[in-house]
Amino acid sequence: MDIFTIMLVIHIIAGSVCLLTGAIASIVKKKIGSHTMVGEVYHGGYLVIFITSVVMAIMNWSESAYLFYIAIFSYGLALFGYLARKLLWKNWLTMHIGGMLGSYIGVITATLVVNGSKIPLVSEIPTLLLWFIPTIVGTPIISVVSRRYTNRTQSKEIMQ
């Protein structure tokens, strides 16, 4: 096996981990414990996706240069959300939700674009739309979730 293939296998495994842990983190109770542990695994997996994407893009620049820029943008969102929580920035919760869910949209988009032609029904959707559907669907979800959790946090602060 050559280095590119090894990177690709690692990339696929890390992507699968992120798809799974991102979904789990979104449904478990938001408190220190399960959510935090799953979030750490998600961030670690995303870091691996970032590194392997950059390496593969550089190795195959003429065909995959776009992966380099997508990797920087998507991991930037994940890192932003991760650091917002770790460093407790002002309005950290809104930034955490936006960054983490934004990065999850990136993983879903990449999965659909790369594998869409092999998925029944999805294969009928034009590839260009696969680039935009996750963002079109996910952005309002980020907004609703951010408002819901921000309002809860603000209500608790007022009551104290």
Image (cartoon, helix red, strand yellow):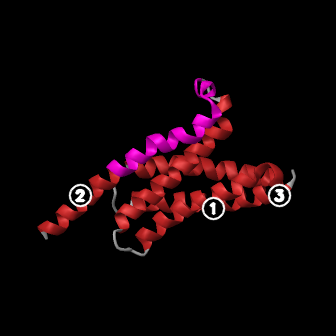
Identify the secondary structure beneath mark 3. helix
Magenta residues: mostly which secondary structure? helix
Q: Which residue type carries mark 2?
A: Asn
Q: Does the magenta-highlighted stretch encompass residue 125?
A: yes
Alpha-carbon neighbours of circle 2 within 10 Å: few (<14), some, or many (≥20)? few
Q: Which residue type carries mark 3?
A: Met
Q: Percent from the top left, x then y, of residue 14?
A: 63, 53
Say how many tags the image has.
3
Q: Give the farthest residue toward the right.
A: 2
- Labels 3 and 2: the sequence-earlier one: 3
* Image quadrant in which you'd find residue 88: bottom left
Q: Which residue is mark 2?
A: 151
Q: Which residues are magenta?
A: 121-144
Identify the secondary structure beneath mark 1. helix
In this picture, is 117 found above or below 59? above
Check whether the beta carbons of the residues at disc 2 and disc 1 lie within 8 A of each other: no
Q: Percent from the top left, x then y, of residue 105?
A: 51, 48
Q: Percent from the top left, x then y, of residue 121?
A: 58, 24
The circle drawn on residue 72 is 1
Q: Which residue type carries mark 1?
A: Ile
The answer to whether residue 49 of the structure is visible from this angle is no
Q: Which residue is mark 3?
A: 59
